[in-house]
Image: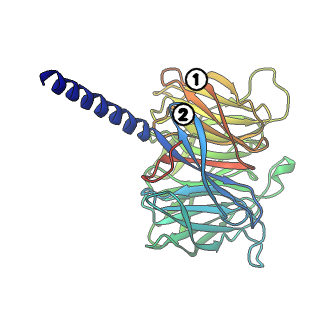
Amino acid sequence: MKTLTSLLLGLSIILAACTSVKQKATQKDMMVYIGTYAKPDAESIFAYNLNEETGALTRSFAVKAGENPSFLTLDADRKHLYAVNETTEFEGQKSGAVSAFAIDQKTGNLTFLNRQPSLGGAPCYISLDHKNKVALVANYVGGNISTFLLQEDGRLGSSSDMEQHQGKGPRPQQDAAHAHCILPDPENNFALAVDLGIDQIISYRLNKSDGKLERQSVFTAKSGAGPRHLTFHPKNKRFAYVINELNSTLTTFTYNPDNGTLTEVETVPTLPVGYTGENACADIHVSADGKFLYGSNRGHNSIVVFSINQDTNKLTLVQHMATQVNWPRNFTFSPSGRTMLVANQKSNSITTYKVDAQTGKLTYTGNSAAVPSPVYVQVVPAFPETPKP
């Protein structure tokens, strides 16, 4: 009897351990939302499951989200997703649009809420202020930025403000102002708008109550640099970084949160010495621990990795990681920071990479997923009823 009891007890311990392992494995699953270039009646926002242990991606669902929902953002509670519809005409206006979706908290599925004109052609970037009160939109062809108050149910109100940029740069791509990025600063007091067409980063004081913007200062980049995307250091909120699309460089800054101004520390090339082929930089991110900076090279088809000096904010080259595919546009990290996902626009794929926390180096997992014209990737923890890979 004692032997039987011991066997049953041992079996129960083994089963409990197996259940525990299964639960832990489930917790490592992630949901990935992907924005794309797509026709108006096509599936255009895709959702995949990421197994972070292997880097494998498995399709979960797709929704018809209107034409070209290229850039996405989520609110802090993961209750709503917002997308720009990157078009140059909407409802008879020379404008793109901005769309709002509710997120099913059990499955992660998306339900369309409403859509507003963006007040400028080809909106290409959207972010939310840190209190989830205001949506900030950059209109590339329109050369302007616009703001939208968010309603309690997640819907977008009509535009609260629009600021038109003026000027042009020396390159053919800089025939006019081309706003490419806008995001709030860490203190949520200023919105910084990056304009590729006029080589400027413009700082606006942001009123969270009414969504109004008040211009404060301007940083002018090197002529023809074409600044594209900006990000802040996650630990030292006074360090900032901009990737310059047209001259394939990356600039580090110190940031003054009192007046929203940027001061250049250094500018470094994103390409290896001797490379003379086509290239256009795209995205930029800092690792969650603040130790490494990453940027994407389209043409050289690589992710460049730098280590960050935590005292001086200067950079040291670590790696050029070939992406195996074509035109790496946007990329992001899993919440743990252990996996990078890259959207390869011209090869219609998402590829995954392991991130070495000690060195910052990337290693290709060998896993990819076929997605038509992917532009943006967003990773969140899996929802309770999301099918697991």
Give the secondary structure at mark 2: strand
Placement of 40 over or under 321, stated as above or below? below
Q: Which residue is mark 2?
A: 339
Residue 259: x and y in percent read 48, 53
Placement of 58 over or under 360, stated as above or below? below
Q: Which residue is mark 1?
A: 361
In the displayed orientation, state which residue is furthest to the bottom. Answer: 92
Residue 86: x and y in percent read 72, 61
Badge 1 or badge 2: first in the primary sequence? 2
Which residue occupies 48% across, 69% down? 154
- Judging depth in this view, the residue of 170 and 385 nearest the camera is 385
Residue type, mark 1 in image: Lys
Which residue occupies 59% across, 26% down? 306
Q: Badge 1 local density, few (<14 within 10 Å), some, or many (20+)?
A: many
Give the secondary structure at mark 1: loop
Placement of 347 over or under 108, stated as above or below? above
Distance (Cα) linking label 1 and label 2 = 11 Å
Residue 50: x and y in percent read 55, 41
Q: Quadrant of the N terminus?
A: top left
> Horizontal placement of 163 versus 279: left or right?
left
Among the 4 quarters of the image, the one containing residue 235: top left
